[in-house]
Amino acid sequence: MSSFQPAVTFDLWHTLLYLEPEAEETYMRRQVESGANVLDGSDASPGAPRIGHEQLQAEFEREYARAVAEAAQGRTVTPSEQMIRAARASGRIPRPEAYEAELEKLLSQTPFRVGEESADVLRELGERGYAVGVISNTVGEPGRLLRPLLRTFDFNAYVRAYTFSDEHPWTKPSPEIFRTALRALGSDPSVAVHVGDGWSDIEGGRRAGLRSAVLFTGLQDYGEQYRRLFVPPTDDATRTGPQVKRLSEVVPLVRRLLPAAIS
């Protein structure tokens, strides 16, 4: 029998936490607007011409999209680094701390919702002795700002460790972010299951050698911008393997897939 504790990790967005499509559109638009506003209020670099707000917004949106593309390759570009890149490209002095302050305000004003069965499933897995973790690609907001938000939803009562990509060099689907998360849980890929809504969850779990990666389809009602940026046009990795429509289906599936946890 393995000496590692069986573990279940979850994606965050559209798995445990989500926004209604219209709210998601607003949230993503305001992220870009916040970046453009910070650039607009920044001093120009020596010798650089002043450019207009619309061009600054286009520059920041371009860097945001580049960060999403790099995340799909398993590489992290943090929100602060996105601001630094956009500032350099537009001839402005980078102010990443100002952008993070704007993101903090935006998070506090956004109507995030917890998946209907999220808390019950996390609690039951914990009570059955599984180590529970969250692995999240944080392209649009840093993990340090998400932690207090998640405390308000009482996730900390059940989640033993959060692994946010902006705090590491890798994003899903890199196997390293899964292995890092499992080490924090005292577990191993051979006795771990990951649950998430997208290609990077399933493909990343496969690359990391997890016992299984489960596609959750119950919250795939994405905003248009989110779908355009984060949902690949072809997602062959999600067409095979176990799928669940409700999170409550995860518990019996995990009990079949993993060795018995210590109660």
Image: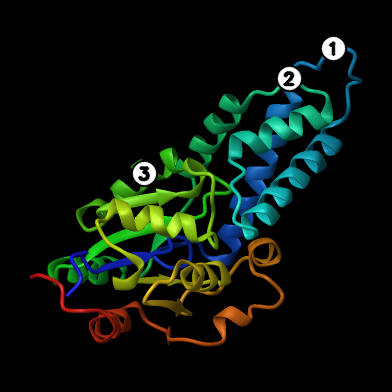
Residue 40 is situated, as x and y percent measured from the top left of the image, at: 76, 26
Number of the label disc, if any, that sits on residue 147: 3
Q: Residues within 10 Å of mark 3 (few under 14, many from 20)?
A: some
Number of the label disc, if any, that sits on residue 46: 1
Q: Is residue 240 above or below residue 52?
A: below
| Residue drawn at 31 percent across, 54 percent down | 183
Residue for badge 2 = 93
Helix, strand or loop at disc 2?
loop
Q: Is residue 243 above or below residue 60?
A: below
The quadrant in which the C terminus is found is: bottom left
C-alpha span from label 2 to label 3 = 29 Å
Q: On the image, which quarter does residue 12 sit in?
A: bottom left
Residue 231 is situated, as x and y percent measured from the top left of the image, at: 64, 69
Helix, strand or loop at disc 3?
helix
C-alpha span from label 1 to label 2 = 9 Å
Q: Amino acid at mark 1?
A: Pro
Disc with the residue nearer the chain's start (1 vs 2): 1
Disc with the residue nearer the chain's start (1 vs 3): 1
| Residue drawn at 67 percent across, 48 percent down | 67
Q: Residues within 10 Å of mark 2 (few under 14, many from 20)?
A: some
Q: Is residue 143 left or right of residue 152?
A: right
Q: Amino acid at mark 3?
A: Arg
Q: Amino acid at mark 2?
A: Ile
Q: Residues within 10 Å of mark 1 (few under 14, many from 20)?
A: few
Q: Is residue 223 left or right of residue 117?
A: right
Q: Viewer-proximal residue, 116 or 140?
A: 140
Q: On the image, which quarter does residue 10 sit in?
A: bottom left
Residue 49 is situated, as x and y percent measured from the top left of the image, at: 91, 20
